[in-house]
Amino acid sequence: MELKDLIKPENLVYEKSKVQEDTYMHYCPGCSHGVVHKILAELIEELGIQEITVGVAPVGCAVFAYNYIDIDWQEAAHGRAPAVATGISRLYPDNFVFTYQGDGDLASIGAAEIMHACNRGENILVVFINNGIYGMTGGQMAPTTLEGMVTSTTPMGRNVDLNGYPMRITNLIAQLPGTSYVTRQAVHTAGAVRKCKKSLKKAMENVLAKKGTSFVEVVSTCNSGWKMTPIAANKWMEDNMIPYYPLGDLKDSVKGV
C-alpha cells in the first residue's frame, strides 16, 4: 500500500493533476519549468479541455514538456512553434492550441515568427519562459540577458555597445493589434504561483473565446546556467530580473482593439 492510499481525502492538501504524466521530473532543482507545467495541467483539467488541447514545443528545455502533460503534442523546429501552432489552429479551429517557448527560442531565432503570429492575431496561447539565458545549450547570452550579466558567451558581462540592449519583447507584443491579453508573471513564491495561474486561466479562456493571441511571459530562474543555488537564483531574479521585467498585465483587450 502506498502512502497516498493512507491519506484521507479531507486531509489531502496537494494532489497531482490527472492531466500530468506519471514520470520523473528531469529539470534541474530550482527550475521554474516544472511549476509552470503543473499550472498548465491543472488548468487544462479544470477547464475540461484535455481532449481538445494541442501543445507545441520547440528546441530547448521547453521541448520536454510533452513528457509531463498528457495531451496531444507537436514538436517544432527551433523558433518555429508559432508557425506550427498557426497551422494546427487553422486546421482545427475548435481545438485549444498553445506554444511553450524559452527566451532564446522565442526572442532570438523565433523573433519573426512570434511577431507575425501575434500581429495576425492567431487564436493561440503563447507561454514564454524568460530566464535570460540559453539554458539547455550551454548558458549563452540570450536576447533577454541583462546588461552586465555573465554568460558563457559574455564572460565579462553583456556589453550593450557590443551586444545591444536586453529585449523586452513582451512589451513589443503588447503593441500588436492581434494580441488580446498580454501579461508578465513569475512562479518563485506561493503568491506568485497563484497570480500566474490566475493569469494563465484568463489567457486560456480568451483563446477559447477566440479573442486573438494571448501571451503570458513567466520571468524565471536558471540556477544551473546562472551558476547559483536555487535560493540565490530566486533572490538574484527578484533583485535584477523583475525590476527590468516588471510583473503585471500589459494589455487586456480583444483582437483589433
Image (cartoon, rainbow, N blue to C red):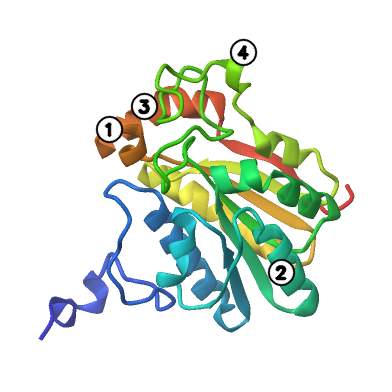
Q: Amino acid at mark 2?
A: Leu
Q: Foreground mark, 4 or 3?
A: 4
Report helix, strand or loop for mark 4.
helix
Query: Which residue is painted at 61% across and 49% down in the image?
Result: 216
Report helix, strand or loop for mark 1.
loop
Left or right: 202, with 187 as reference point: right
Q: Is residue 116 above or below residue 47?
A: above
How packed mark 3 is, by other alpha carbons closer than 10 Å (few <14, some 14-19, many 20 or more), is: some
Q: Earlier in the sequence, mark 1 or mark 2?
A: 2
Q: Foreground mark, 4 or 2?
A: 4
How packed mark 2 is, by other alpha carbons closer than 10 Å (few <14, some 14-19, many 20 or more), is: some
Query: Which residue is painted at 41% across and 71% down in the image?
Result: 67
Task: Tell me the number on the disc at residue 228.
Answer: 1
Residue behind mark 2: 208
Task: Tell me the number on the disc at residue 161.
Answer: 4
Residue 230 falls in which quadrant of the image?
A: top left
Residue behind mark 3: 236
Q: Amino acid at mark 3?
A: Trp
Query: Which residue is painted at 66% across and 50% down in the image?
Result: 215
Q: Earlier in the sequence, mark 4 or mark 3?
A: 4
CA distance separating discs 4 and 2: 44 Å
Q: Are marks 3 and 1 in contact (CB under 8 Å)?
A: yes
Q: Are marks 4 and 2 in contact (CB under 8 Å)?
A: no
